[in-house]
Amino acid sequence: MSMSARSGGWAALVLTVALLAALWGTPSTHGEQLPPVAIRSPVDDAQPESEPEPVDEEVFRDRRSTSWQAEASAPVPPNRVPAPPDGAGSDPLVVPATTVPPPSTTLPPVPTVPPSTVPPPVVARPGQVTVATGTSTPASAPAVPSSGGGVPAWPPYTTRPGLTDVAALTGWPAPAEIAAAPVLAVKIDNVGLARPQWQLDRADVVFEENVEGATRFLALFHSDVPGEMGPVRSARTTDLEVLPALNRPVFAWSGGNPGVTEWVASAASSGVLVDVAGVRSNCYRREPTRRAPHNLVASTACLRDRGATGGAGAAVPLWSIDADWTAGALSTSPDTSFEVAMDGGLRAGWTWDPANAVYVRSQNGAPHVVASGATIAAENVVVLTVPHRPSAVDARSPHAETTGTGPAVIHRDGMAIPGSWVRTTTFEPFRFVAADGSEIALQVGRTFVELAR
């Protein structure tokens, strides 16, 4: 063998050894594991209770037909959790169940408070519904957390008797089957893409709540219930301030982030409400003429069926109603028109219509018209100034506190009556008290409540 051949062989051998050494590593590092790859949990990227509206369209880009109704009737997998409201709308996301940890803090259960401690309303005559005055529920009744963390623990709730021949929320005469029916509490959207709403004008009571740079409605349907209503959107923790007073209502909402969902589930498990969420129910359809997520429509017949199955209670009054109440010597002022400043720059305007004895609503100067062409109107407009704090489940979402007391202005019969609102627990009705300590009753008819800052 020539010298050049032997040199070539040695060179190949050296190269082979070098390659093997590179693959095996040096003795000091041989066998050492690679550093672990950081795996980001879905919880790390969990979206808040709301996001800007454009994000909604991305989540719903492939869910824009009425076929969603058929999809909703399919069995819900155990790891199906609702997407955050507003930003991701109300459709569900599926994530590995093990990646969603339990709540870091849980409030201890509170002592059981028999619902019978709330005195029943008294119907003295047609056009009058009087709720009991004073503190009627012990101080140990459940309240939502005052600071972050935790899920409220409501005591087991037993429904109370309703009224006879009177619609509890309006004071209108009603046949027995209507008087005994439950309240359908429906979350209704109010951003520009959600207007005009479907049948919002027919709700007995509407609470307007501040959300994230906008407002949303908790509409209570009882005496005048349409076949469908919407667009239905996600819940907020503020809703759990009002719902316990409704004697186990049927709660229709599209879905919510895990925190809100836990709050609603806790209330439902104690019998405080009947939970009919869009992500777990076929009571909804998508209206193809609207852009999702602002097109979710609820079926009244289906909601009532769910209420019957869930043992929903009869409607009960939220305040005293008296058609013959007069201000007497109380300080009042004419209110031919007024505005209420809400979040997102929204100006809720109201104008007294003496011919029809109602206040007619506008938003930012334009009439608030529903899909049928009717303008929203109410016999009563109640403006409550209530404390707002960051929600325990999303610091960017405001939570309106409606227990305690605060300033109130009652608008009825074309006059503004200043006073205070008083409410000890979330199970109690509201009381409206004038400066002299006397109670202010609402007019018979529909009521719109502005939860203002």
Image (cartoon, grey):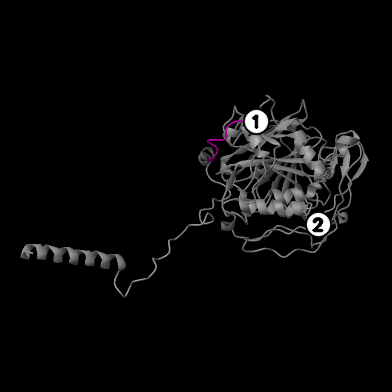
Instruction: Answer with the quarter of the image where residue 334 lies.
Output: top right
The overriding secondary structure of the stretch rendered in magenta is loop
First in residue order: circle 1 vs circle 2: 2
What type is the residue that disc 1 sits on?
His
* Residue sitting at x 91%, y 42%: 123
**Is residue 60 part of the magenta span, yes or no?**
yes
Q: Few, some or many C-alpha atoms within 10 Å of disc 1 (few <14, some 14-19, many ≥20)?
A: many
Residue 46 is situated, as x and y percent measured from the top left of the image, at 54, 53
Q: Look at the numbered disc 1 and give the secondary structure of its residue.
A: loop
Give the camera-side residue of 438 and 153. 153
Identity of the residue furthest to the bottom in this view: 28
Q: Please state the extent of the stretch shown in magenta in the rendering.
A: 59-65
Q: Is residue 83 left or right of residue 154?
A: left
Residue 417 is situated, as x and y percent measured from the top left of the image, at 76, 42
Identify the residue under disc 1.
368
Q: Look at the numbered disc 2 and give the secondary structure of its residue.
A: loop
**Is residue 368 part of the magenta span, yes or no?**
no
Mark number displayed over residue 97: none
Q: Is residue 410 visible?
A: yes
Q: Is residue 379 visible?
A: no
What type is the residue that disc 2 sits on?
Pro
Q: CA distance from mark 1 to mark 2?
A: 40 Å
Identify the residue under disc 2.
156
Counting every numbered tag in the picture gives 2
* Residue sitting at x 58%, y 58%: 98
* Residue sitting at x 68%, y 32%: 361
Q: Quadrant of the N terminus?
A: bottom left
Give the camera-side residue of 401 and 413. 401
Q: Is residue 371 above or below residue 253?
A: above
Residue 327 is situated, as x and y percent measured from the top left of the image, at 82, 41
Give the camera-side residue of 217 and 89. 89
Identity of the residue furthest to the front in this view: 1
